[in-house]
Image (cartoon, helix red, strand yellow):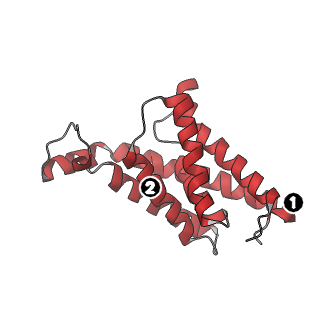
Amino acid sequence: MKINSSRFIVLTLLVILAAFSRALPLVVDHTWNFTAVGALAIFAGAQFNDKRLAFIMPLAAMALADLLFLRNGFSLLVYSGFIAMVACGFLIRNKVNTMNVILASFISASVFYLITNFSFFYPVTLYPRNFAGIIASYTAALPFFRNMLLGNLVYSAVLFGSFYLLSKRYPVLAKA
């Protein structure tokens, strides 16, 4: 597969910038979970021609941002959720349009919410390990789901919109 190096560089820079938005709560007071990371996963899945890179680039950028800024450890559930979000980007990769980006934003936030708040997965949890505990976990996480969904929608508009405008200005960035 021939790699368009200009496209690869621009996509990689956009993914890294979006991943580093995870550090924003450390410098400004903003709403938790309203970040670009969900949008970057969808964007990577939709835009990287090589499916391996679609997974590797956003996960590596997030791991680097976590290491540098968050220092709260690696969460297999969180990264599994982001892997699922990249897969949502695959669903729209050959048909990127406004409605599909909105749908991918909603589906990916929903999948992430379902994966990361299923309390049985955690070795230590605030909730009892029964149906009531699962419902309590999901209920407590609703504000985070809302914020992630809004972040996905806003940052997807920024990422996909920016790349669309750049591709129109610099045709070398278009998919091969």
**Residue 121 placement (x, y as % from top left):** 26, 49
As drawn, 167 above or below 140: below
Going by the image, does 126 lie left or right of 87? Answer: left
Q: How many marks?
A: 2
Name the quadrant of the N terminus: bottom right
- Residue at left offset 41%, top offset 47%: 78
**Residue 92 placement (x, y as % from top left):** 58, 71
Query: How far apart are labels 2 and 1 at the CA level?
Result: 31 Å
Location of mark 1 (residue)? 169
* Residue type marked 1: Arg
Location of mark 2 (residue)? 109
Going by the image, does 129 lie left or right of 101? Answer: left
Going by the image, does 8 lie left or right of 68? Answer: right
Per the image, label 1 sits on a secondary structure element best described as: helix
**Residue 150 placement (x, y as % from top left):** 50, 50
Q: Residue farthest to the bottom?
A: 94
Going by the image, does 85 lie left or right of 111? Answer: right
Name the quadrant of the C terminus: bottom right
As drawn, 7 above or below 138: below
**Residue 65 placement (x, y as % from top left):** 57, 36
* Residue type marked 2: Ala
- Residue at left offset 82%, top offset 57%: 6
- Residue at left offset 67%, top offset 58%: 160
- Pointer 2 and pointer 1: residues touching (CB < 8 Å)? no
